[in-house]
Each structure stands twice: as structure tokens, then as C-alpha cells.
Amino acid sequence: MIIGAGLAGQRAALAAAQTGASVAIVSKVHPVRSHSVAAAGGINAALNPEDTWESHAFDTVKGSDYLGDQDAIEIMCREAPDEILWLEHAGVTFHRNETGHLGTRAFGGASAARTYYVADITGHAILHVLYEQLMKHAAQVDRYEEWFTTDLLQDDTGRCVGAICRDLRDGTTQVFDAKSTILACGGAGQAYKPTTNGLIVTGDGIAQAFRIGAKLMDMEMIQYHPTTLVGNGLLITEGARGEGAQLFNAEGERFMEKYAPNKLELASRDVVSRAEQTEINEGRGFPDGGIALDVTKVPRRRTLEALREIVNIGRDFAGVDITREPIHIRPGQHYIMGGVKTDVDGQTTIPGLYAAGEVACVSVHGGNRLGANSLLDTLIFGRRAGEHAGRLAKDLSMPSTPAARVADTERRIRDIMNRQGGRRVSAIKDELGETMNKYAAVFRDEAGLQTCHQIVRRLKDEAENATIDDRGTVFNQDVIGALELGYMLDCAEAIVVAALERKESRGAQSRTDYPGRNDEEWLKHIDISVNGGDVPKVSYSPVTITKWQPEERTY
Amino acid sequence: MPEYLLKIRRFDPQSGQAAYWDEHRVELEESQSVLDAVLKVRNEIDGSVGIRCSCQQAICGSCGVRMNGRPGLACNTHLGIAAARKWRTEAVGGTRDDGEERVIEIEPMGNMPVIRDLIVDMDAVHWKKIQRVTPYLVNKEPIPEREYVASHDEMVDITQPMACIQCGACVSDCLSMEIDPGFIGPAALAKAYRFVGDPRDADHESRLKDLAEDEHGLYDCTHCFNCIDACPKEVAPMSQIMRLRRRAGSDYHIDDRNNGNRHEESFATLVRDYGLLHEAELLPRSFGGNSWFGKFAPAAGAVLAKSLPAIIPAVLRGKVSVKGAMFGHKIGSKDLSAIKRLYDKVESRKERVELNLYVVGEEEQPEPAPVGGAASSESEAS
């Protein structure tokens, strides 16, 4: 059983089906609505004969600020070229170079142009092609579209044996028995406001795994993307800078020369976002609180062909023709490097439960993910989880959870519908998002994080009695919103607790009270696990180092 | 901030009530989206308003609705633009506004059954049609060890149908589908072109033959342009349908049993011969081809007889004159020879040129744009 039908989930479904397993894929939205669709810039692989997987791996390790596990990074970078070719043969319409071979563009933190792309709709193109393959393999993969997973199920030994899901169309609840369950339901961006993430990205899988005892890892590592629209936080792809767009402060200075004299705009995302935020904090931003991204440096025809989506975004959401004038951007919440802790086959700390994609933390991204490595992560580890789970399923007997188990879930949903006198779900969600964006953002400190934690604890209490308006069963999105709020709050608390714990600055965790990286004490993962209703427990696990010893990180 | 009167079409199948208009007043900027307004209502007033939505940046394709009578995405339609549209009076149900208030009616998309409020059953119509067109690549053999070699232009070209986000806006307002619910429709046919235009696909001819021979297929489109207007991603489904027809007719010479190709060709030859349409010749040529014997094609007579109930009222109301229909419309001989020269020029080309419709309006040199206030000189230095 696969929960979530973005890139990781669909890739896992196809891989599991290939092993001969009988597969169900469940998603709270139609698969092509999954947020993978918004990935724009491309997907990394050292496929070009002059490039090497070691170079890709080193860039990823360095990008992670040495917190990434190098065994996992090696696997991802080694398997990347074959995955690109698999996608190409499945029908992805990758853009070509002059010789008709796969074309590449430059991307941040990379020492070679190794990002394969379809205009600036790469995630969209891959997601739709995987869905074409799911339609082709409908006999092997059952699709449950618009089914919301409410609970993961465990047997007496603690093994995960499936899930309980609600059919949004008629509100019926069902037990799904599964020999293996793969979580592939994305990150938790909606715990922040603004965020580049869609409204569906509410941390469901991270929280559900956490609640049944799975360990979370690297939760403090929240990526702020350097180029999101000032007004509403919409994403402007890194592909723009990859194609040659430049950043300027209000004084007209190309300020990246100060922060990353070699890579400039194409330094790692954490570096560029910190640079922008420093410029803004020191008064060199524009009055609207932003920095200028100048896409006019890219030839206009190239922009129209390869960056079409952001031309439309500029026009529709900011009233700016980016081929004619700069657009104002700022760092905005984009991605969570952390998630449900897994091994390189996607196995979590709960037997029978796998995770892949943004919901998981392998960890290949460590303290900071490189642009165009996330699509790769979803596909490589989605496939590996699907293959592993599919192979294992042959030797397992089918579990059977009593259908009566749905009664608990149905009661809980009825209770939510019957609540009265509490705050509105949307009001709590807004306060959570604004709080996280204020205190657990690009720069952090002890006092701010403590305040943040207190607010999150209060919001958790308030959420217990948050009220909704809709008491129906057909497409009741209101009650789903109340459940999602609970998931986001669990994720938010894990983020804040981990950020408080890590007393150094590494990757996306930039503590103004602990400004330096401290390998002696903090070259380790922070694991977070459930502790009843109390503040989650913290433990540590080692970082796997194979070839690359930590060095000073400059761009 | 201006105030908008939102009229949201509500329907709950459990209530036993018919659909009704739910009115709310919201204050928002003109440049904010219709989705912003609906979500404001949902978040602050009534959490039970049903609408699918996620990305809020026109890429996930969830929020297709009709706004003041026109389909599109709620998330990239500005309130100011939606309110300025003239709405269809019949949809207002007698509450037509006096023009001063900024009214936006938001309804579910058409041609698909409503599940609840603004949520329609896309599986029942849209996705069923997508599945009709063999919606996956049929690989050319042998599959290369590395990538297929394909030209840059070809891949950019099929990026246009690939850019479809499956929102259903084109399906919503497809007039042919309104008349013939079996019509494969704009979205699915655009999807078909994504494979027919893909140099890696092995099945171009059989795909085209399949779609041409289907009576609800290629030739069921009536050129109304609604899908092109509706599409929020510039996929231009109708243009993709026309490309499929050109490939089927000109490249593969598929003479379909629906007579679609011959009908289309007869328009072309009639304009070449007469400069304008010649209705009396249209049917014979569509069935018998462009020859003297063709005039006696029996199928043409049968269709003529079947069409009389439509033709007679048209004559009675003066839409068609008997003389014009029988003897054709005349244009000057100079103009006619100019038209013939155009035909000669186009038809003398060895290859048919398919224009790339996706990237238009580019110029070689962009004008240098200043950065920030007085910053243009410094930015040059970089």
C-alpha cells in the first residue's frame, strides 16, 4: 500500500508492481494534483560522459553542510543516470541540445551543468508521465484517488499493517490491510505562512508515522528558497538563475559578489537566502521588503521557451513582465530536509512502514538540499522502497485488521464535527504559519525559538477544540482541514524542538547565538520521537561518512 | 479595497435541495484572485464551501470553475478581471445587477456532473476520455541504450500539449461535447497530439486512424475556439486537433469513414475554385471528391435529405438564399486569381510546415532594463 501519489508514490507503485506485488496507491487528491507538479527547474544526474557521479555526490555532501549520510548520497548519485534514462524511455519530454541529445542547465551548488529539464515544468512533466504509466499498468496498480488516510495501523507486535482511509466522495471509512505500507505524502510546508507549498502539503505522513512511534530526523532543517515572490510567496524557479538571471539589492549592487565570490547566484540555497536576508535586515532591500531578481539578463527567446511558467507567474501574480523588468523576491519557506528517518531502502524505524520523498529523511540532503536533487530523491528512493517492499511481500502473510477498527476513527471524526465554541481551524493555522515564519526561519535564536515553542504548545491545546462548520459526509473538506491542522502542529513542534537542540549553525539552521559550525559536538543527526502528549523526546544518531571529511564550506 | 459580491453556486446532494446561489461580500484587492475570495469566505465565514484547490499558482489544475460564465482557474483569475466580464443573463436567475456592484458568479464547470458545490466529477467525463486515447508512449523499437535522439524543436513543440494541467476548463465549455457527450473532446485530443507529435512514439499512424475513424473523434470538433479561450496554460487544444487532422489527412492520407477528411478538403478546393464557399457543391465534394462523377455520390443525397429540416428554416429566415446556395457566391476575377496564386505558392512547397505555436512573440534583443532606482549603470558592470 502506498500513501501519496506524487513522484515518490507513483514511482514506488510502478516499481512494486514490477516485482509482481499487488499494489494499491491512495491519495487525498487526484495524483496529478500532488505537489511534485510544482517542481520547476529540473533533475540532477551525472549522465554526461565528462561528468562523474563522484562529483555530483561531493556537491551534494558539501551542499548538505556535511550532515548528509554519504552512503545514501552515493547510492542516489550513482543510480541517477539510469533513472533519467528510465524516465526518458517512459516518455518524459526532456528538452534537447543542438545535437538532439538530452540538454542540461546550470543549477545552484553544482560544479557542472547536470540538471535535466522540461522548460520550467519538469516536475509537472514527470508527474504526468508517471501517471500515464499508472494508467497503462492499471491491472497491477489499483488507484484510490481522493481518499484521505486518517490512521496507520499496527498489529500487536508493533508492525505497520496498513491504514484507515476515508473516501472523500461519500465519507465512508475503510480498513486497508497491507503487508507493507509506503508513506510518500510529502512535506509540511503549510506549517509556514507564506510558503511555496500547496494547501495540501500538511505533514500528514510525518505526523502519522511520528504518532505510531517512528523516529523523525533532521527536522530543524527547513529550506528557505532564495526566490519567492514578495507579495504571496510563490516560487520563482532556480532555473532562472541557472539560465543567467542575477540578484541586486536596492542600491543596485550585485551583492552575491560579497557572499559567494565564485558561484555568485548559484551558491547553495541556504547561502543565497542568508545573503538576501542579511541585505534586507541591514536596510538594503526595497521598501516592499524584497530584493530584485533580474531575468532580463537571459535572452528573451530563451526565457519564453525555457522559463515560460515564471513569465506567467510574473504576469498573473505580480503584474510584472520579467522579460522586461526585474521582479521583487525574498527567501520563502520551500522544503523540509528532515522527515521520517529511513535507511537506503526506505525502511523506517517501524517494521513494515516505509517512507520516500519529502516525507522521508534518508538523509541525502542533510542541512541543505541542492536544487534539482529533490526530484531525484523522490524517484530513486521511491523506486527503492517500492522494490524492497514488493520483494518482501512475497514472504509475508496478509494481515487482517478487524473492520470494527474504523469505529474509533469514525467516532473521532464525529467528535470534531460536534465541537462548539472553539477557535476556527483556519485562524489557528494562520497563527501557526506566521509564528513559524517569524521564529523558525532563515535566522534563529534561543529566545525566539522558546517563544515559538510556547505558542505552538498553546495552539495544540486550542486545536483540541477547534470548530468547523461542515457536518456532511460528501466531500467534507472542513473536517479534513481539522485533521491536517493536528498533523501540522506535530510537525511544527518537532521542528522547533530540534532547532532548539542544535546549538550551532549548519546548513539551513542558522543560529545567531551560535554562529559557527561545530563539528566536534554537532556533526550528528537529531532524532525526534513521540512522548505521549508531552514535548517530544530527543536522541542522536551518527552521520555516515564514506569519502568526504568535513571541510570549510565556501562558494 | 473594492468590495465584491460573490455568488457561489452551492449544491449538497445530501440536503435534498436544488442548487442555489450563496451570496457573500468580501473586500479584496482587484489583483487578488477569485480563489483568494472563495477561501476568505471559507476560512472566515463558512467552512463548508466546497472547492478543490492546492497550489494557488496555476500548476496543479485543481480549481477549474466558471466565473461570470467563463471557465478557468480560480487561482489565476483576478477579481477585477472576473468582475468586468459581462455575465450571461440567463445564469443570473432574474437577479441581474444594475452594473454598479462588482458581482462575480462562481459556478462549477460544465459538461461534467456536479458532486458538490464547485466540485465536479472529472473521472466520469474528463479522465474517461483521456483513457480513450491510449495515453502513454508506445516506444519505437529498438529502445536505445541511452536516450532517443530527437530535435530540440520537436521536444519544445510537444511541450505545448505537455503543458496541459488537466484542469478541465476546455472540457467545461466544449460546444461539440454539449451536443455529443461522446466526443473525445479538446483535452484528450491535445493529449493525443502529445504522442502523435512525439518522435519516440511508434504508433502515430494507428493512433491517427483510430481517432479519425471514431465518429466522436477528430472530425467532431466544430472550430468554435472555446477551448482555446478557456485554457489557462496556452495549450490551444483546438490547434492540436487541427494538427492531428493535418497529420491524418496530409501525412497519412487517412480517408475516414466519417468523411471528415474529404469534407475538410472540399472546403479547401471550393475556396480555390470559387473564392468563397459554394454550399450546393459542398456535400457532393465531401462524399464524392472533387470530380464530376462525385456529384452523384448517393451518400450525399442521403445527407442532403437528412439535412432538409435544418436547411428549410434557414432559407425561410433568409440566412441562406437559394440562388447563393445553388450557383455559389461570386467574387471579382482579380481577387480569384490572387487566391489561386496563394494556393499555388503554398501547394508548391515540398514539405508541410508546422509552425511552433508555443513560443511566439520573441525578439532577438531585449531592451536593457534598469534595476532598482539609479542602479542600471552598476548592473552593467557585473
Image (cartoon, grey):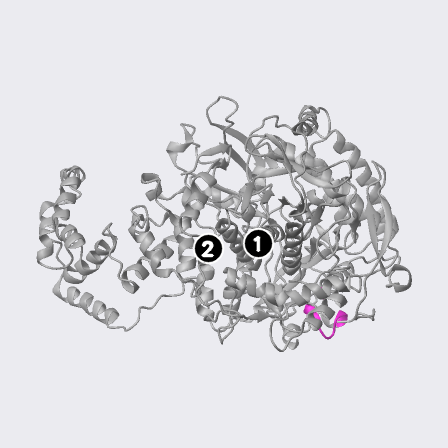
Task: Answer whether residue B271 is magenta in the image.
Answer: no
Instruction: Evaluate whether residue B1 shows in this view.
Output: no
Give the percent coordinates (x, y) of residue B3. Answer: 56, 37
Residue B96 in the image: state x and y as whole percent: 42, 31
Q: Chain of mark 2?
A: B
Side of A15 relative to B124 (left or right): right
Answer above or below: position of B154 versus A1: below
Q: Quadrant of the C terminus of chain B?
A: bottom right
Tell me which corner region of the image, top left, top right, bottom left or bottom right, holds residue B350.
bottom left
Query: How many tags in the picture?
Result: 2
* Range shown magenta: A258-268
Residue type at the position of mark 2: Tyr
* Left or right: A274 as drawn, with respect to A181: right
Residue topped by disc 1: A18
Residue A502: image tag: none
Q: Chain of mark 1?
A: A
Residue B136 disc label: 2
Amino acid type, residue under disc 1 in the picture: Gln
Asked if residue A267 is among those painted magenta in the image, a careful observer would answer yes
Does residue A510 appear in this view? Answer: yes
Q: Are marks 2 and 1 in contact (CB under 8 Å)?
A: no
At horizontal 47% and vertical 53% (from top left) the residue drawn is: B164
Relative to the observer, which residue lies in front, A382 or A50? A382
Nearest the eye: A218 or A313: A218
Examine the rendered structure and indicate whether residue B150 appears above or below residue A168.
below
- Name the side, left or right, on which A169 lies relative to A284: left
The quarter in which the N terminus of chain B is drawn is top right
Q: Residues within 10 Å of mark 1 (few under 14, many from 20)?
A: some
What SS does tag 1 mark? Answer: helix
> How far from the left and from the top, in percent, is residue B276?
18, 57
